[in-house]
Image (cartoon, rainbow, N blue to C red):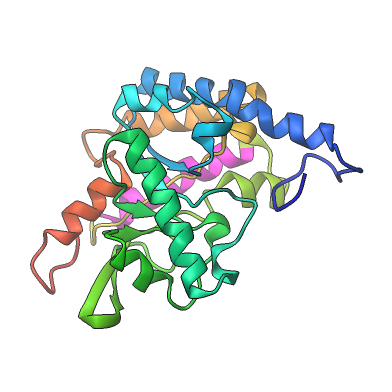
Amino acid sequence: GGGLGAELAPGGPQPDVLNYAWRDWGNRVGVFRLAELFDALALPASVLVNSRIYAECPGLMDVFRARGDEVVGHGRTNAERQGTLPEEAERALIAEATAALTREEGRAPAGWLGPWISQSRTTPDLLAEAGYRYLLDWCHDDQPTWFSTRGGGRILSVPYPQELNDIPSIVGRKDSGTQFADMIVDTFEEMREAASAAPLVMGIALHPYLVGQPHRLRPLRRALAHIARHRDEVWITRAGDVADHAIGLPEGVVPG
């Protein structure tokens, strides 16, 4: 009944059934429709996971585990911002979320996206110290870039989409599902041409309660099928695979 989140319509007094049910539909129905779409097009995914999902929606992650998708740390819940916490509290949040994901998935996540893309000034340091190899919060480039961390360490920033993200597009700008799909195709074609000169990363951020809705799922299917038809020309992969490739390059080499 509290915290942060996109709304279908302005909420009323608690219990806010209208908005709660809309969001809950994503974890009951929409998420499985997206998984079926990814299966049909043979598309891998990176799944950004709030650690409380295991308790709140038991069994939901089974479908992605079976697909072999990457699990990325995404805090405990999107009802809080980690960037507003004191350092020790933020360290504890990262540790708690990481422990839950490691316990449930059998391996520690390599990547992290802060809930609400929220960082403090020490977040990259804390993530590196917790064993993370890359973060997704900084959407400032079309290629992976290195961040220096305290103690002589570093952590890789992998581009995460803010424009090709259904929350800013559909909730923020009120774009239709068709407009969002057109944005995906147009971005892909523009970047496919530009990538002949330099390697680029293009991501698409999807939330099941939005694009899992049938009237948005159909145009999304069209857009993703367009990309899938070019799989011989581009590398369709997970964020962690991009990070591993970039981390393995010699110093000074542009990620390609």
Task: Give the image quarter of residue 157.
Answer: bottom left
The answer to whether 237 is drawn above or below residue 202 in the figure is above
Figure quadrant of the N terminus: top right
The region drawn magenta spans 179-195
Q: Along the horizontal axis of the image, is 108 left or right of 100?
A: left
Instruction: Answer whether residue 139 is visible to the viewer in this image.
Output: no
Identify the residue at image location x=54%, y=55%.
115
- Pinpoint residue 98: horizontal percent, then vertical percent: 38, 50
- Pinpoint residue 132: horizontal percent, then vertical percent: 29, 58
Looking at this rendering, what residue extends furthest in the left direction?
250
Task: Give the image quarter of residue 44.
Answer: top left
Figure quadrant of the C terminus: bottom left
* Overall secondary structure of the magenta section: helix
Q: Along the horizontal axis of the image, is 193 left or right of 23?
A: left
The residue lying toward the viewer, choosing from 67 and 80, is 80
- Pinpoint residue 126: horizontal percent, then vertical percent: 37, 69
Identify the residue at image location x=68%, y=38%.
176
Instruction: Answer whether residue 48 is visible to the viewer in this image.
Output: yes
